[in-house]
Image: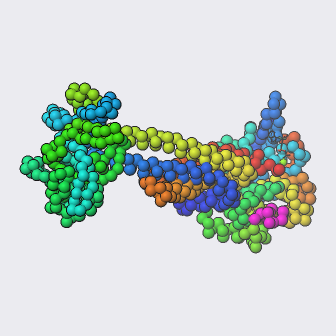
Amino acid sequence: MKQNRFVRNILLGIENLLLHKLRSFLTMLGVVFGVGSVVAMLSVGEGASKEALEQIRKLGSNNIIISSIKSIDEEAASTAHSHMSIYGLTYEDHDRIAGTINTIKQTAPVKLIRKEARLMSRAMELRVVGTTPQWFELVKRPVLAGRILLDSDIRDKSAVTVLTEFGARKLLATENTIGQPLRIGGDYFEVVGIIKSESGQAGNIQIPDQQVDAYIPIDIARKYFGDIVTRRTSGGRERELVELHQIIIDVDNTDNVESTAVALEQLLNRFHKKKDYQISVPLALLKQAEATKRTFNIVLGSIAGISLLVGGIGIMNIMLASVTERTREIGIRRAIGAKRKQIIVQFLIETVVLSTLGGIVGLGVGVLIPMAITYFTEMPTVLTLLGVLLPLLISISIGIIFGLYPAINAARVDPIVALRHE
Amino acid sequence: MDNESLPARQNDIVRLENAYKIYPMGAEQVNALAGVTISFKQGSFWAIMGPSGSGKSTMMNIIGCLDHLSKGHYILQGHDVSNLDDNALSDIRLKYLGFIFQSFNLIPQLTVQKNIELPLYYLGWDAIESAKRAKELAAMVGLQGRLGHRPTELSGGQMQRVAIARALANDPQILLADEPTGNLDTATGEQILELLAELNRQGKTIIMVTHESYIAAYADKRLHMKDGVIDSIEGNGDEAK
Ligand SMILES: Nc1ncnc2c1ncn2[C@@H]1O[C@H](COP(=O)(O)OP(=O)(O)O)[C@@H](O)[C@H]1O
Ligand SMILES: [Mg+2]
């Protein structure tokens, strides 16, 4: 019975709104656009930040990546003839880091080599990384065929290589390539495995395996190819001595990542005269991305708030006009015996029906926009339950908040004044 | 103030005792009612007459529980309702009173049926019962075929019939009519009065404001107001009625 009455009240509200279809529709528009923009922005924002967070997670949130960089004056000096640039991380750095900082669980040194390679009849320049089996602990990728580098390869100084998916594609290598010889520079390596690779970038940090075609044991790399790289340039020859290009570090605990980064900086600073290295902390990026998301949410919330406020004021405005226009009706209802509370409920329901309807239509618009964005731009968008429920809840609240004043105004109508002959 | 209040009798349905309605007008005061004492008996039919501004509408508003007295008492069916709050007065209007207005005061957007059902809606009747009752009432006032029409599609006389049906929906004790024929031509006005007289014969107490003596002739009692006080009472009904 009570329920029935509530439903009848809502039906009465809808009936009244249908009497002024165009006006109701126009009044709703503010809320439609308000809610629509909230839903759309939430879903675009959620999609963007989800992608960013995923990228960072791929780097490993417990990892720290130290990279060698050429300092500015080294860059300037290298233009001189027959100058050799010496910079970057050293084998000693790696040993010191692994040996002195006890929050570090494991490390992987990275030596980058570009060499002509040949597999069967196919020749290519490959990007080869000399590293240790720890790499595969730190940059976990599924094995597609064969195996990864093992401790025994290091111990036995085996000339073996593991291809990445990129490298395998370049060389047209398949499962059948396992066991075959791959010539790198002038030396032969046995292909022992192919692993999956990831591409992408998080902030300014590249995913470690993005530019890698093949892995070989670091000691072999050093023995076969040395540390000096000679490049022919237009001005002549350019020589560089870089021992390690990267050191990837796995910290034992997420809480220790930042303090470890500080300790690394201090340690390296002691042994490097020039700033020829750079420390990247994915976790810091993660935190930065989260902070950016928070800021984004605040900005978004404000924009949404303003547009919903405008929508709400629009509704209030129309409802106030409607109350004035319907003074006589209110007077009649009051004279017949309607209580003030019942008049308030009647007008409040009308406003809430209006704003909720606006909210539902807005939700439809707000869901279509991100779908269209994803369809046309491949930008990811994510529709969360909260992203749907929140705007609906807000539109209902808008109806109540902005409907209350007109409804109270309606209840204040004095039937004697309202019914006086015109 | 001379309070020559008569003792309230059992069959007094409406009784005003030394009733004042005072409106402040700047420094002055307007006494719309200036000490009225009168009893209306159950089942009587009254016409209230008097020049414009004499306090007729004010008296109707008080009796109709739409307004409060400034001073004095209003006793409705033996209960002093002078000091009730807005909610309680609304409840009395809903359950015991029916209003008929000069300008009909139907809700133009609602059909005849919905207009008649309006009091039932606030009484909490369910939709089916309400529709049934609306149909009966429409038949009673001679509007059986018109339930689906809007008020604007009806003549003045028909609109007033709808208003009467609506006033009867809650089966009230008292019908209050402020110039019910003011907007109608003579013939239609007389038809409406016939209907009211019939309702009075069925037991409704009717209090009606009118300017026209041929309309007032339908009532058993005529109360003449002047400057907020009772000027005279004439009646053809017996005292006991
Ligand atoms: N709300 C009001 N404020 C001030 N004066 C009023 C108000 N209502 C009525 N009056 C005054 O009270 C007197 C009686 O009015 P009313 O009862 O409407 O007379 P009637 O219906 O007999 O023409 C008039 O002088 C009128 O001006
Ligand atoms: Mg009047």
Confirm whether the magenta stretch covers residue A390: no
Quadrant (top left, top right, bottom left, bottom right) of the N terminus of chain A: bottom right
Instruction: Find residue B142 and report its horizontal and vertical position in percent.
Output: 78, 70
- In the rendered image, is residue B232 in sight? no
**Residue nearer the viewer, A87 or B187:** A87
Side of B29 relative to A95 (left or right): right
Confirm whether the magenta stretch covers residue B153: yes
Q: Residue at x 66, y 49 (%)?
A: A319
What type of secondary structure mainly makes up the magenta span?
A: helix
**Residue nearer the viewer, A325 or A356:** A356
| Region rendered in magenta | B150-162
Side of B113 relative to A203 (left or right): right
Q: Residue at x 69, y 43 (%)?
A: B82
Side of B197 relative to A74 (left or right): right
Instruction: Find residue A284 and report its horizontal and vertical position in percent.
Output: 33, 38
On screen, residue B159 above or below A279:
below
- In the rendered image, is residue B72 in sight? yes
Q: Residue at x 87, y 53 (%)?
A: B210
Q: Quadrant of residue B196?
A: bottom right
Q: Residue at x 69, y 64 (%)?
A: B114
